[in-house]
Amino acid sequence: MTTTDSAAQRPSCEVPAAAPGMPAAQRTRAQLADGREIFFFDDAPRRRTVQDRREISRPVGGNEMRYDPLLREWVAIAAARQHRTHLPATEECPLCPSTPERATEVPQDQYDVVVFENRFPSFRGDIPIPEDLLSTTTAAQETAGLRQPGSGRCEVVCFTDQHSSALAQVSLRRMRTVLDAWADRTAAMLAEPGVEQVYCFENRGEEIGVTLNHPHGQIYGYPFITPRTRTLLDSAADFRARRGADLFTEILAGEVADGRRIVARTEHWTAFVPAWARWPVELHIYPHRAVQRLPELTDAERDDFAALYLDLLRRGDALFDGPLPYISGWQQAPASAEPGLMRLHLQLFSIRRAQNKLKYLAGSESGMGVFINDIAPEETARRLVAIGPQTAESGSATPTDTEETR
Ligand SMILES: [Zn+2]
C-alpha cells in the first residue's frame, strides 16, 4: 500500500503556525518486499506507485543487547551485520534507484530523499527494556552481562539518487527536504514502543568507516538513553540546580559574547567550535530558540538551517582541499527526558587534522575516554571563518567524482 501526505502535517510534530518559506516535503509511505517500511520525501508534490518485485525475506533474530556492569551501558550484538554489503562497485550500489535490469533497495527509477528500514540493523525490536531490570535479577546475572532481546529501530536515509554526489552538493531545497525527513522520522520513531531516543546522523568518508559510498545517513532509534545523552541531561540538571540557569542558553550566550570561536551566525542558528573541542575539526550548531527535538522547528528555522548547514559542509570540504571525512549528528531529547532540560543541537566533527593526517582514537581516547586535541579550538574556528561563506555558486573544492573508489 502506498500513502501520501505532507511531512509537516503529522499530528505528532509540534510545528507552530507556518511562517513564509519553502513548503514541507511531501511524504509517500510504502513497503519493501520483505515487509520493511520505506518513505519517499519529495521536494515537490509527486505521485509515486511503489512495487518491490524482489524475492527477499527479513532474517529472523540475530539482535541482542548485553549489559556492561562496569560502565552501566548497553552493548548491541548484531552478528548479521558482519555479512553486510561492503563498498560495492558503483553498478552494484544498493542505494541507487532500481533499473529494469537491477532491483536495488529503492524500487523507483528516481527519488529525491528516501528513508527505509535498515536490512542489517544494529537495533531491531519492539520490546522495551524493563525499568526494574536490575532489581529483579541476581548479582551473578548482572555481572555475567544481562541479555535483552534486540530492540529499537534503524533506518537508512539517502540524500540524493546521484551516487557520486555528496550532501554538501545538494540544492537548498533538497537540504530542506532532508531536514523534513529527519524531523518526520524523529516524531514517528519516538512514538514506537521500544524506542527511547532518536539519533539522526551521517558518517561521511571511508576514513570514518562507511561501507557504502552513496550519499546517505542513518537514523537510530535506541531502546534506552545513550550514555552521552544521559551525561548531558545530568549536567544540565546539575547546572540548573547550582546556578539557577539553563546550561545550553549560557553556553550559547558565552560563545556569542566571546566571539572567537563563532564560525557563522544566522537569524535562527549559531555555529561555533566549543571551547573544549575534542576533535581537530568540531562544530556545534545551536538553534536560538530552546527547542528539544527536530519536529518542533518552524519552517523559517528549517530553511535557515538548510542554508547554513550547506555553507558549513562546503567550508569543511575547503579546509583540506578535498572531501572532509566527518561524523555529524543531532543531539535531541529522549522521550522520557524532563521537559525543557535538553536543547536540540547538531554536533559535527572530523578525524582529519591535516592534509594527509588523521586523528586516531588511541590509548588515552579509546582506553580512558580522555581526548587530546592537537589544534586549539580558536584556531579551528579562525580557519573556518577565513574560508568565507560557500554558497552553491561559489562552489566547493570537492570534485564529486573522487568519492568513488574504483
Ligand atoms: Zn548508489
Image (cartoon, grey):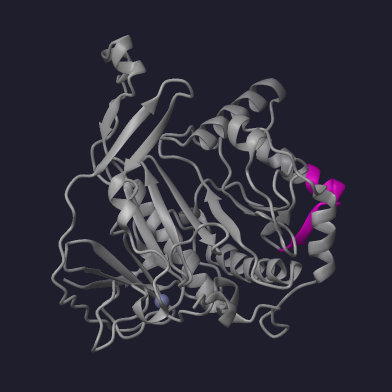
Residue 276 in magenta stretch: no
Q: In this view, does 246 lie above or below 68?
A: below
Please state, as top left, top right, bottom left or bottom right, where the N terminus lies in the image: bottom left
Question: Can see residue 95?
Answer: yes
Q: Nearer the viewer, residue 38 or 183?
A: 38
Residue segment shown in magenta: 254-266
Image position, residue 390 (x, y; %): 73, 75
Report the image quarter containing ligand 1: bottom left
Image position, residue 399 (x, y; %): 63, 81
Q: Nearer the viewer, residue 186 or 362?
A: 362
Image position, residue 382 (x, y; %): 85, 59
365 with respect to 131 (left or right): right
Q: Nearer the viewer, residue 78 or 395?
A: 78
**Where, by quadrant of the figure, is residue 56 drawn?**
bottom left
Identify the residue at horizontal 70%, vertical 66% (top origin): 316
Identify the residue at horizontal 85%, vertical 54% (top origin): 379
Image position, residue 191 (x, y; %): 31, 47
Identify the residue at horizontal 35%, vertical 58% (top origin): 155
Q: In this view, does 305 lie above or below 262?
A: below
Question: Can see residue 188?
Answer: no
Q: Is residue 254 above or below residue 41?
A: above
Q: Nearer the viewer, residue 169 or 371?
A: 371
Residue 255 in magenta stretch: yes
Q: Residue at the far top: name it.
A: 139
Q: Residue at the far bottom: name it.
A: 100
Total marks in image? 0
Identify the residue at horizontal 19%, vertical 75% (top origin): 52
**Where, by quadrant of the figure, is residue 10 drawn?**
bottom left
394 with respect to 227 (left or right): right
